[in-house]
Image (cartoon, rainbow, N blue to C red):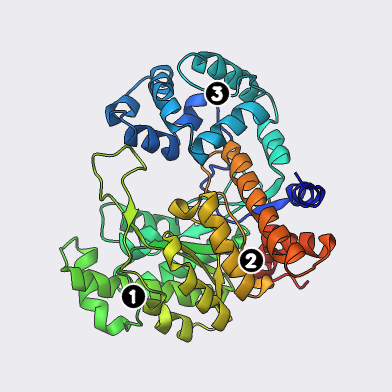
């Protein structure tokens, strides 16, 4: 490696990051067994794609048997970056000597993992090695947000159920219970939602988030116009698709107004279609298509100019549009490299475009989307390597930047912009 590339890579690797989106359980953020890790959907879905029957990793399969089932198919994935994540975890976090994982050594790796993961402070060890010191969560609206350090594991209100599934069994009852509001019409629904936001704000919440399908196009809908539809929803009566959409738009707009009132950014994660491959493994049934355009959100972005909207796109092909929206609109921020865009070739291409066109203070470089702390280590290191390569090629070689100036830009993407956008830090 050229000396300058090594120096930049080492410097970028040393930046302590803030992870702005995870699915961690703050009461048990790290894995307890190798099965916890290997059940992560990337490995199970790739194994299934490579020929493994989905039944071999079903929930009723014994954990020891499940990891052996996966291990048989891992050699078929050895070319993938996701297999590389597993090797990085095994080697660097668990201290495994082999440079491969398959059915020949899976039991030895499982035994070593159990020993390491039982050690006191394992979660802190993983965070330190990953160079992450704050991780944002994804919390249900009725989460009590108790029993953990909300400055280390920062609450984020995930509002998919409130917006998209309020009429499903149990959701309304949960809202009534956690808000202590007898929700029976639009006024009381708004009061209950306000109570949820107040609870999250009291517990250091820094964001609200939602995942939206390609056909979602939010519009302002008045309370009066949806009162009959809300009454039917609360009574458990069916609505047509268009009627459901009107209710969803009303709730979504109400929640965005609460984000405005409370000064919370609203993370929009756009484009996933759920359950299109029902024969797939758990977590491996969702895809995307290209019907989505950010123009569907123009009314929203115009109406809430004071709300910060970090936008994640599942389809890397939409990156040019996200760049233009972030280029023009002060309240739109490109966020991470989500899901199917989370591989190095797409990260580097998308990152180059963003760095060439979007103000540096607006870019949320990366988040892990992890379910277990161990997954943050290889994912962030993958991004750091991509970032280092782009910095050398685009800024040091092409533009003549100093190494110090390039590393300072990396600090914006990995850390400071999270502070600017979610903590209103002035820097």
Quarter where residue 316 is shown: bottom left
Residue 197 x, y percent position in the rendering: 51, 66
At a point 32% along the width and 70% down the height, the residue shown is 216
Please state if 157 lies on the left or on the right of 230 as rendered.
Answer: right
Residue 182 in percent (x, y) is at 35, 64
Instruction: Identify the image quadrant of residue 284.
Output: top left
- Which residue is depicted at the point 32% across and 84% down? 222
Quarter of the rendering occupied by the C terminus: bottom right
Identify the mark at residue 111; answer none if there is no mark.
Answer: none
Disc 3 from disc 1: Cα separation = 46 Å
Q: Are marks 3 and 2 in contact (CB under 8 Å)?
A: no
State if disc 1 and disc 2 touch (CB < 8 Å): no
* Lower sequence index among marks 2 and 1: 1
Is 34 drawn above or below residue 180 in the view shown? above
Q: In this view of the protein, which residue sits in the foreground, 425 or 290?
A: 290
Query: Marks 2 and 1: which is nearer the front?
Result: 1
How far across and down, in percent of the image, does residue 205 sit?
59, 60
- Sequence-earlier tag: 3 or 1: 3
Q: Which residue is drawn at 20% across and 73% down?
A: 243
The residue that label 2 is drawn on is 422
User: What is the secondary structure assignment of the residue under circle 1?
Assistant: loop
Q: Residue 342 vs residue 99: left or right?
A: left
Q: Which residue is drawn at 56% across and 19% down?
A: 109
Residue pointed to by mark 3: 100
Q: How crowded is mark 1: few (under 14 residues within 10 Å), some or many (20 or more)?
A: some
Image side of residue 325 versus residue 112, left or right: left
Which numbered tag is attached to residue 217? 1
Does residue 29 appear anywhere in the picture?
no
């Amino acid at each position: 490696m050229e000396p300058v590339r090594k120096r930049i890579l080492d410097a970028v690797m040393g930046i302590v990051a803030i992870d702005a989106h995870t699915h961690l359980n703050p009461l048990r953020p790290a894995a307890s067994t190798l099965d916890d890790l290997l059940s992560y959907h990337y490995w199970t879905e790739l194994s299934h794609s490579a020929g493994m029957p989905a039944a071999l990793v079903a929930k009723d399969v014994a954990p020891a048997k499940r990891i052996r089932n996966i291990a048989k198919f891992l050699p078929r994935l050895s070319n993938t970056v996701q297999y590389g994540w597993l090797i990085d975890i095994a080697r660097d976090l668990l201290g495994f000597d082999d440079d491969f994982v398959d059915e020949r050594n899976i039991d030895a790796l499982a035994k070593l993992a159990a020993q390491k993961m039982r050690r006191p402070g394992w979660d802190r060890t993983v965070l330190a090695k990953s160079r992450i010191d704050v991780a944002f969560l994804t919390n249900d609206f009725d989460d009590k947000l108790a029993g953990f350090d909300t400055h280390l594991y920062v609450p984020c209100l995930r509002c998919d159920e409130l917006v998209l599934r309020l009429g499903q069994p149990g959701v309304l009852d949960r809202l009534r219970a956690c808000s202590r509001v007898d929700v029976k019409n639009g006024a009381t629904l708004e009061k209950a939602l306000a109570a949820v936001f107040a609870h999250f704000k009291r517990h250091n919440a820094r964001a609200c988030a939602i995942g939206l399908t390609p056909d979602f196009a939010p519009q302002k809908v008045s309370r009066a116009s949806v009162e009959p539809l809300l009454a039917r929803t609360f009574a458990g009566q069916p609505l047509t698709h268009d009627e459901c959409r009107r209710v969803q738009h009303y709730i979504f707009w109400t929640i965005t107004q609460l984000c405005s009132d409370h000064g919370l950014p609203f993370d929009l994660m756009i484009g996933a279609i759920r359950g299109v491959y029902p024969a797939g493994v758990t977590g491996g049934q969702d895809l995307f298509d290209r019907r989505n355009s950010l123009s569907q959100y123009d009314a929203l972005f115009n109406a809430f100019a004071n709300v910060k909207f970090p936008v994640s796109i599942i389809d890397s092909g939409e990156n040019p549009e996200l760049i233009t929206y972030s280029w023009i609109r002060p309240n739109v921020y490109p966020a991470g490299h989500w899901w199917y865009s989370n591989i190095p070739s797409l990260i580097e291409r998308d990152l180059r475009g963003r760095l060439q066109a979007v103000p540096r203070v607006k870019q949320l470089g990366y988040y892990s989307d992890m379910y277990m702390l161990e997954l943050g280590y290889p994912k962030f290191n993958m991004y750091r390597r991509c970032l280092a390569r782009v910095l050398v090629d685009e800024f040091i070689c092409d533009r003549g930047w100093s190494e110090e100036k390039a590393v300072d830009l990396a600090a914006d993407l990995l850390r400071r912009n999270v502070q600017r956008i979610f903590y209103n830090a002035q820097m």
